[in-house]
Amino acid sequence: MTGAGDARTEEHSYVAVAEHKLARMFGAVGASRDRIDEATALLRDVTRPWGTRTVPRRLSYFSAASNDGAPIELSMGWQRDRTEVRATFEPMGADGSPAERLRAATEVTEALGRRPEVSLTRYHRIADLFIPPTPLTTFTAIHSMVWQDERAPWFKIYLNPQAHGRDRADEVVREALHRLGFTEQWELVRQRLAEPELSELDSELVYVALDLRDTDDARVKLYLRHAGAVPEQLEHLAGAAEEHVAGEVADVCRKLSAKLAPKPPITTFTLVSSAARPQRCTVNLPISPNMDNDAEGCRAVTEAFRLTGLDPAPCERALAALITDPEHSHMLNYVGVTGQHRLTVFLSLEAHPVPMTWP
């Protein structure tokens, strides 16, 4: 039986806020009530016990999971033949302290591994590389659940390549990708970053992500943040990917009037075992705090759909259901553009005020 105090806690909890918005996202894409109930129940389950605690008035720890510092972020992805809804979360453990987050990162991952649809085989090959010698002031691992159309959800993990410091991130990633069989792909990216056109670009490894499934198309993803980037540099870097179309990235940046500062863009290289080069490069263009509000961000997202030839109507319905005061809100975090292949929109819970400075 839940007491009045418990009810108030859950009503103002991270998971309560996320469930409400997640249900609206699913509703916007025509999901059934059963599908929505299954998704929100899963979110509640994987974020126990911290997810149901009261949202603090002031943050003692700003999570890397989202742009408002909350440990949960939602996102949606569109391709020509499918739609994705995702919930990303950083396990907080008992009290959100660095030691508890470190413990919870491993504990939650192993718990997910007991699910029949999850494989930790690749994770276990490299996990030791991402365990810091002492608990980090930033994240150790972030997890993500992905729902595609009516299929069963699947899971991803984002590991911190700076677990041993930024100066050792390249070393950690090189060894991890060697163990996973992607040495050649990473070397191609490193060589591209060393070319004269990118010599002044401040690139920082921020995430290494794994699909936690044992399938032929399971991916590894590398995320790099680029301070001071200009469209031509992003275009040149994206050229390392097999499916890149020359001129596409610079064109999107220009036509969206992309604001690449103060918060920098992030590029994501997708690695798959069937390709000798990185398969794709996604350019994640920052929205908040670089744009004034969500109204400006929504216009940029709609224009991105138009440029890629994807139907913007489902995304517009979802954003209208989620963003009720676009002139004064800052939920939109990034829009990720993967050529003509895919668009992804990332949204905070806006459980806390979004900082309008960077970092």
Image (spheres, helix red, strand yellow):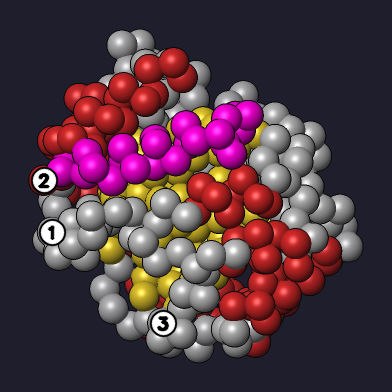
Q: Which residue carries the number 1 mark?
A: 214
Main SS class of the magenta portion in the image: helix
Q: Which residue carries the number 2 mark?
A: 121
Helix, strand or loop for disc 3? loop
Q: Is residue 185 magenta?
A: yes
Instruction: Give the residue displayed 46% in from the left and 64% down from the top.
Output: 244
What's under tag 1, amino acid-wise? Asp
What's under tag 3, amino acid-wise? Arg
Looking at the image, can residue 156 be seen? no
Q: Is residue 354 left or right of residue 41?
A: right
**Label 2, label 3: how far apart the Cα atoms are:** 27 Å
Q: Is residue 346 magenta?
A: no
Residue 125: give x, y in percent of width and height: 13, 36
What's under tag 2, amino acid-wise? Thr
Depicted 198 relative to depicted 44: above or below:
above
Residue 164: give x, y in percent of width and height: 37, 16
**Label 3, label 1: how far apart the Cα atoms are:** 21 Å
Residue 161: give x, y in percent of width and height: 38, 29
Residue 316: give x, y in percent of width and height: 68, 80
Q: Is residue 133 left or right of residue 191?
A: left
Image quarter of residue 197: top right
Q: Which of disc 3 and disc 2 is earlier in sequence?
A: 3
